[in-house]
Image (tube, rainbow, N blue to C red):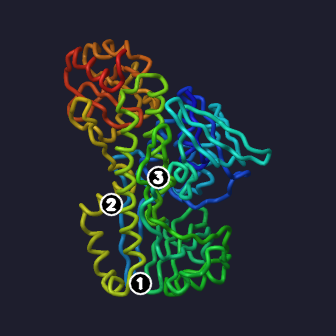
Amino acid sequence: MSVIIVGAGPTGLMLAGDLAEAGTDVTLLEKRAEESNLTRAFALHARTLELFDMRGIADEIVDQGFEVSGVRVDLGGGETALDLDHPESRFKYVLTVAQARTEALLQRRAEDLGVRIRRGAEVVGLEQDGDGVTLSVRTRDGSHTEHASYVVGADGAHSVVRRLLGVGFSGRSYDTHIILADVRPDQELPPAINPYMGADGVALLPPYGDGWFRAIVWDRSRQDVPLDHPVSLDELNDSLRRITGGRISVAEMSWSTRFLSERRQADRYRVGRVLLAGDAAHVHSPMGAMGMNTGIQDAANLAWKLVAQERGWAPSWLLDTYEGERHPVGRQALRVTDFVQRMAVAPAPVRAIRPHVVPRLLRVRRFTAAMRRLISGLGVRYDRPHEVEDSPSVGRRVDDLPLVHAGEPTRLYELVDPARFTLLDATAQGSVAEVAQPWADRVLALRVRGDLPEGADVLLVRPDGYVAWSGEHPASGQVRQILAEWTGAP
């Protein structure tokens, strides 16, 4: 089997690396002839960092970023805060880091694993049948066709793949032109994500940790400035002065752009042998910094299912669960970012009560915990497929459990295989791991010591780090049944 991925952004690069690591033949087509210095996304949330951790690349990107554990909201008449500390994760913070660095890390991983990245390759046609997908591709040297078993469109909000499939992109554009810029303020700001909400608009200033900040600015008086109009330092300072009441000014600006924020989602994530991921499947307001993270998590969900399809052990229903699981997650991300956007870019009646409502909301622990888990991705849970047996915690994210394996202390995320299920056998006899040996090509069975969730002594973990099944002293026949349900006959 071969896979062509269209789009060399973070989603496409993550997916390409995962597929290549599992031995799949992968080609990545990118319309841009040169690597982009675009740096729109500025944050990696805890669940994305956990997925990187399972691939052995988290520590490298953490060293390049800045750890932020709170949001300090300035409402013009006072301040309030949202705690972003994640006690359930090794990554208890939001990592602010330029998108270009995240892309560079994922690209190096993909290339080291043998992914072919062809830049300056524009997809202009698509046909598929029961055997595969044929793409018409245009380059500076002419046109040609490429064929693969599956194609994934990760080619952004204006996805050509989505258009060629005829898939709708439901939603709307916000009536707001937003400025993005990387800036060095004159003032020393707290090491937190700093939203300023004023009568003239909103400015969001998360830190990179080196004196530079990302500025996301919506100025009510300049919301109709054409998107192709350059952003000047004087314009940005004028907007910041009015929005923050003169408290913030910028000394330097290294990069800037304007863009029109949208709230849209693809009606379908799969049409036959073609699938959509990342911004091709969903686009959100930048408030909440969920777009890139949701796309990377799409890739982690999809990769192992394509690998299972390639290796012939995927149940007939498995690939359909990609849309079934990720479409609701994309919809939830739209709702969360839309709520934050509406609170920030509010009409006059809402602005009048906002200084009173927002602090009260942020004092409600259930609300702040829910928002923290939704934005971070730690709260994602998938429904149990009807075709598999139910058990405690099925579909939930698995914590990075402290374990002992082969006599050495370790963590679960150091053991999981992103292409295979991981079966943890904490029974005294270790007989469950022996039962799983006929499935060794698709199940990594490990004898371990440690506390498993819900009092279980056997835990089957999906390749993307969610519970597939758990049990206490299961019979051998039950274990065989569970493995066959998820991964087919041995």
Determine whether 303 is above or below 338 in the image: above
Amino acid under disc 2: Met
Density class for disc 1 (Cα within 10 Å; few <14, some 14-19, many ≥20) is some
Q: Quadrant of the C terminus?
A: top left
Q: Quadrant of the N terminus?
A: top right
Query: Residue 486 location in percent, x, y?
Result: 33, 27
> What residue is pinned by disc 2?
371
Q: Name the residue at 26% across, 63% down.
A: 367
Q: CA distance from mark 2 to mark 3?
A: 30 Å
Amino acid under disc 3: Val
Query: Residue 88 location in percent, x, y?
Result: 33, 47
Q: Secondary structure under badge 1?
A: loop
Position of 398 with respect to 249 (left or right) is: left
Query: Residue 295 location in percent, x, y?
Result: 48, 50
The label number, if any, that marks residue 76 in the structure image:
1
Amino acid under disc 1: Gly
Q: Secondary structure under badge 3?
A: loop
Q: Nearer the viewer, mark 3 or mark 1?
A: 3
Using the rendered view, name the quadrant where residue 222 is placed: bottom right
403 or 310: nearer the viewer? 310
Determine whether 296 is above or below 169 in the image: above
Position of 69 with respect to 147 (left or right) is: left
416 or 138: nearer the viewer? 138
> What residue is pinned by disc 3?
167
Q: Nearer the viewer, mark 2 or mark 3?
A: 3
Q: Name the residue at 60% across, 66% down.
A: 211
The label number, if any, that marks residue 279 in the structure image:
none
Q: Name the residue at 28% across, 78% down.
A: 357
Q: CA distance from mark 2 to mark 1?
A: 23 Å
